[in-house]
Image: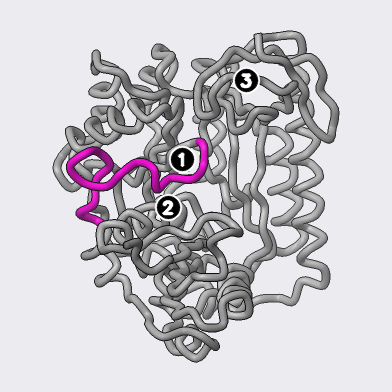
Amino acid sequence: MPGPKVLVAATGCKLNQAEADLWKAWFVQNGYELAEDARQEASVKVCLVTTCTVTGRADRSSVALIRRLHRRYPDAKIKVTGCGATRIPERMAALPGVTRIIGYEEKENLIVPLRYGKDSCDVFVISRNRAFLRVGEGCERRCSYCVVSRIRGPVRSKPKETILEELHALHSEGFGEVVLVALNLGLWGQERGESLTLLLKRIEQEERGVPRIRLTSLEPDTVSDELLGVLATSPRFCPHLHIPLQSGDDRILEQMNRPYRTKEFSRLMNKVTRMLPDACIGTDIITSTPGEDEESFARTLEFMRAMPFNHLHVFTYSARPGTPMANMSSKSVKTPRERTKLLRAEGERKSFEFRKRFQGKGREAVLLSPTRALTDNYIDVRISHTSRPVRSLVDVKITEVTPEGTIGIVK
């Protein structure tokens, strides 16, 4: 007899998405049945929500999701976990339908021991067509605007042999691409005297089948020449780097407690473009932080335009209680969202220019659906319908590039 149905939902980053998959595996191991489609919705008995708290907007999105699930499943018990549940548990607990808050330590104890493979959790719990594999947790950095590192604690890295076994399991289930995720991926292994470069070299040496590997965000000071060399010489790793800038003004970087300045960042970008000429380079930028006056923003805009970015994630500063920056005095910015809007428009222009470089060329891509593929260098391509298996790797020729999107065919 099937067990009670549970629906697992998440907001926020890829690490949250990876943890949501582990929660699905935990529920399956404990006798629950996953609710994934409309035919099952009416009988959902439990909802688990993994929340995000990186910004005020993330808090609001988490609250809205919980309210939406309660309206849809008024009789379901809603359990809330994640960063938002840890930072503002009382607010989350007061929401309608919420019966339990699962704090950070309890969450870690329940899902961290789970591993993909026949002896642990089944790969079928992953519903998306790229697998997000959690390989580490925590961050010792204390950027003055960031509350998440203060919630998630110090770096803890999954052993490399465990990661390899999970990669084999995911590959055997048809995943052509796996994304390695952690709160600060570039610090993987540091607590054991190891490094991310060492992990990637071990993956490269593996003779058994493994998927292609994409890396999530890497802090600038963790991107070494040796790491770039591994990425540049092996087709097993995607030519795609997301390296957060956060600000193009040195004074603001100092206020943010970031461990680099624009000169060092510019040198790194020169190395990346020289060693990985076809790579997509993404970045994060925060606008309207305390102290960002018109001159500071102008320097950020000028620096961003000069950098070889191809994909921008820009958002307006949101004060996080418990962080040093939240206590800084701030001159009122009349139109903070206008700064964000301007940078995003520049990002769209840079994306178009980058994608145009590959018109008429072929790239290896993972099939996200029968009509959509993602290239190794992070170009989202709309394709003619294909019967090739989703999740698999195919060769795609880019036939048309517009500001709105990219079109191609499976070769």
Colour mode?
one colour
Foreground pick, 257 / 202: 202
For the point 58% across and 19% down, the residue is 388
SS for dot 1: loop
First reached walking from the N terminus: tag 2 or tag 1: 2
Name the residue tied to disc 2.
15
Instruction: Tell me the quarter of the image containing the N terminus.
Output: bottom left
Residue 114 lies in the magenta-colored region: yes
For the point 45% across and 25% down, the residue is 176
Looking at the image, residue 39 sits to the left or right of residue 358; the answer is: left
Amino acid type indicated by mark 1: Thr
Looking at the image, residue 259 sits to the left or right of residue 69; the answer is: left
Where residue 31 sits in the image (x, y, percent)? Answer: 28, 63
**Alpha carbons under labels 1 and 3: distance apart:** 29 Å
Circle 2 Cα neighbour tier, 10 Å, few/some/many (<14 / 14–19 / ≥20): some
Whether the residues at callouts 2 and 1 have beta carbons within 8 Å, the answer is: yes
Where is 89 relative to 281, above or below?
below
Where is 107 relative to 181, above or below?
below
Amino acid type indicated by mark 2: Leu
Name the residue tied to disc 3.
387
Looking at the image, residue 402 sits to the left or right of residue 161; the answer is: right
